[in-house]
Image: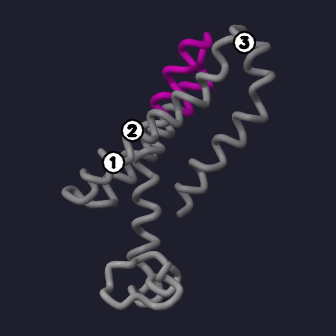
Amino acid sequence: MLATGLIAIDATILATAVPSIVRDLGSYQQFPWLFSIYLLAQGVSVPIYSRFADTVGRKPIILLGIGLFLLGSILCGFAWSMPALIVFRLIQGLGAGAVAPGGSRGLVLRWPRTCLRTRGWSIEHPNPPEAVRL
């Protein structure tokens, strides 16, 4: 869950720092790609990492994601131009894609099924509680 929080706070930090980044690196026209490439890489890689997590296990995939995210963060700190920063944000997004399914899967595995069903997390039961019926 801590890793998921790390991934979530990244967007907040970048949104605050964008004016300084654009001033230092230039290329005002390319700065929307900082957000877009991150979300695109995360969105595309989540199903892939989810499949790998089912076969290999959650822990190695989450550790791989944290490593990729950390590598991308370090490289973003050393970015010399806007295109380089965009590529490094791609690496961060790939790492975030590996962390996202692990965090939500850990939440589902920790709570009992009946507790999740009453909160609307599962409707596979033939007779779901009233809270799940829509």
Give the residue number, with chain letter if any, for mark 2.
Answer: 44
Q: Quadrant of residue 84?
A: top right
Amino acid type shown at disc 3: Tyr
| Residue at 80% over, 23% down | 19
Q: In this view, does 102 lie above or below 15?
A: below
SS state under label 3: helix
Q: Does the magenta stretch include residue 88?
A: yes
Task: Report crowding for label 2: few under 14, some 14 to 19, many 20 or more residues within 10 A (C-alpha).
Answer: few
Residue 30 point in image, percent of width and height: 64, 14
- Camera-nearest residue between 68 and 111: 111
Q: Quadrant of residue 109?
A: bottom left
Give the residue number, with chain letter if any, for mark 3.
Answer: 28
| Residue at 43% over, 79% down | 110
Q: What stretch is highlighted in magenta?
A: 73-92
103 on left or right of 24: left
Amino acid type shown at disc 2: Val
Q: Earlier in the sequence, mark 1 or mark 3?
A: 3
